[in-house]
Image (cartoon, helix red, strand yellow):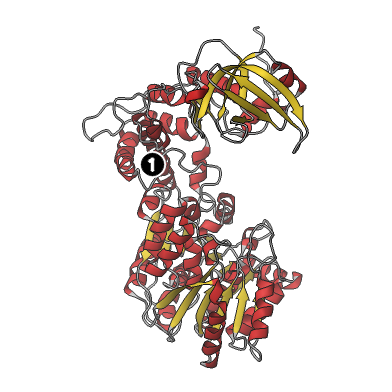
Amino acid sequence: MPAKTPVKTAQSLSAPQKALIKLGLVRDIDLALHLPLRYEDETRIVQLRDAREGDVVQIEATVTSCEVTMRPRRQLLVTVDDGTDTCVLRFFSFYPSQQKALAVGSRIRVRGEVKGGFMGLTMMHPSFKPAGGVLAEALTPVYSTVAGLAQSYLRRAVITGLSHADLSETLPPTTEWPDPRGAWSLLDALQFLHHPTPDVSLAALEDRSHPAWVRLKCEELLAQQLSQLTAKRERDLLRAPSLKCQAHGLHGRLLEALPFGLTSAQQRVGQEIAQDLARQVPMHRLLQGDVGAGKTVVAALAAMVAVDAGWQCALMAPTEILATQHFAKLVSWLEPLGVKVAWLIGSQKKKERAAMLAMVESGEAALVVGTHAVIQEHVKFKNLALAVIDEQHRFGVAQRLALRSKMHAEGMEPHMLMMTATPIPRTLAMSYYADLDVSVIDELPPGRTPIVTRLVSDHRRHEVVERIGAQLQQGRQVYWVCPLIEESEALDLTNATQTHADLSEALPGVMVGLLHSRMPSAEKKAVMDLFTSGQMGVLVSTTVIEVGVDVPNASLMVIEHAERFGLSQLHQLRGRVGRGAAASACVLLYGTPEGGRLSETARDRLRAMVETHDGFEIARRDLEIRGPGEFLGARQSGAPLLRFADLETDGHFLDWARTWAPHLLDQHPTLAERHIRRWLGGKSEYLKA
């Protein structure tokens, strides 16, 4: 029998091999697709007299002096002369072997950034090697790496991966649609991007507009669309309980009992959800609506359809404050209808938790509201059929999968309704959320007052405090949000504790509360109860109030150091006011560095907040400023964000990929599978959550 090839264990791997695995570079194709961060030009020798300050150049010169000095700190100073000028090489960290290689009289090739100074031309920590040898024919790639993985090793590994990877075409030729990929094959594009010729435009490489980059962007977007479409089709083969809305059941009774009518947008979205629930295929719907659009009541009506059919529903929220808000609202709506609502959070007393767990397991509790506590192993549902996840981007893939696994009916999956108050821009919905059905509540309930947004410099804080006093005299309440709890030397921010003390002193006779994430749950609840009941005039808080707090009497929101917050976060915070009939305002207090200016990104965010209240426009601008990560949260855990394509600039390539994906999947399934495997490996499994 032939000897078996020994399998390498983790212990037998070298440090560089372990580092490659840490970077996710396991397959040949992974290495081929690990593209350079930047390039170095080692194709020519530059004379020192032609070098300009700030240029990164390669020179050949002779060492004329080499000495270790101790002032102002220990350093190695090496002077070199190439016959046209001299240059000082400065090393603050060095080894004896390097000092030996730089002995007087040595002829060396040096590469580094040229700087001017009192000593003439200098280079800080340049790379060097013996002079001579063949010059590079292409630009030298510089890759992202980790500790223990040298560029030289990584370059060799990439070359090996490129030569071994299967880079054959996965798209059949077609004349049905214009092909934006051009004449470049995938192999040619990758070889070029790893080793571009020196005559190429560096700008085209850096802004990724070169045809070789276009080829990769199109392939990547197609892989994403194929994986999303595959996940959606696989889900359509699963089975779920058919939950049909009963004409005179709990759904109708809740509608009649509500103290308000639904908007036309809520009615439309409710019908879309009801149609999904009636099917025997698991619903996988994303419900998006701006702050205060009324998503909770839509979820409650969907839950009543499940309860009417004899099943249970679970609603999971990311924070105890938001879960508490949902629980209070749902209990007030549902318990008069005879529907029991259970409550599960991490800080519950043991006796209360045991009682709730028993209600859930027996089926006595038709609806279960809570935080991550809902998905703990000891939580047993009798017959879960509908899972609602609020602020879904706050939860990871594993947490959503854990909630789905709570259904014990053999061969069946629960229906899933995911909600977000962060509207998803169109390009993001078409790409990362292409496997979901999306419903949009694009209308606010009547009676919501417009919120006036003002930018105020931190130097005018006293005016803001005076404004607070005026609001309090009218019987109104105020939020004051701070970005940090404790002082930080790195960030010059006023902490919530100090602000609480300052406002308490400035507003005698007014109850000023403090709320932050490190407080015990019981203390948080007590503070919120005082504010909700109207006894507390001012609530100083960190961003724990970002979602889920609903106090109609609060008419002023002050956000301290607003320039430090993300745009969607500012929009969420602003949505805490304007919930009643009184005119409401949001003051964005901003600070600037001493004698400096706000960054361009901060100015863009604050300008957007003043110019628009439209959540979708806010989301579009946020995508421009911050990229997709803010919207996705942990949805793509385990799968990379788009590495090459940019949704803001490459939307036309996305349209092409969306058109091609179903055609390739239907007509050429083997090629489609190869394409997904090439680009995503096993990571497409995460889309099933």
Report the side of 227 relative to 398 (left or right): left
Residue 181 in view: yes
| Residue count near mark 1 (Cα–Cα under 10 Å), binned few <14, some 14–19, many ≥20 | many
**Residue bearing the label numbered 1:** 225
Q: Please name the residue shown 69% across and 59% down the image.
A: 489
Quadrant that contains the N terminus: top right
Q: Pick whichever, 404 or 611, lies toward us.
A: 611
State the image coordinates of residue 555 (x, y, percent, origin top left).
49, 82
Eyeballing the image, is 668 above or below 413? above
Q: Identify the amino acid type marked 1.
A: Gln
Q: Please name the residue shown 40% across and 81% down the image.
A: 449
How many numbered discs?
Answer: 1
Outermost residue, front direction?
A: 118
Q: Pick whichever, 30 or 387, lies toward us.
A: 30
Eyeballing the image, is 326 above or below 78? below
Q: Pick whichever, 422 or 671, lies toward us.
A: 422
State the image coordinates of residue 304 (x, y, percent, origin top left).
47, 71
Report the side of 1 relative to 590 (left or right): right
Q: Please name the residue shown 45% across and 48% down the image.
A: 238
Outermost residue, top direction?
A: 1
Outermost residue, left direction?
A: 175
Name the element at disc 1.
Answer: helix
Residue 149 in view: no
Q: Please name the residue shown 45% across and 61% down the image.
A: 603
State the image coordinates of residue 248 (x, y, percent, origin top left).
39, 77
Eyeballing the image, is 286 above or below 557? above
State the image coordinates of residue 290 (x, y, percent, origin top left).
42, 68
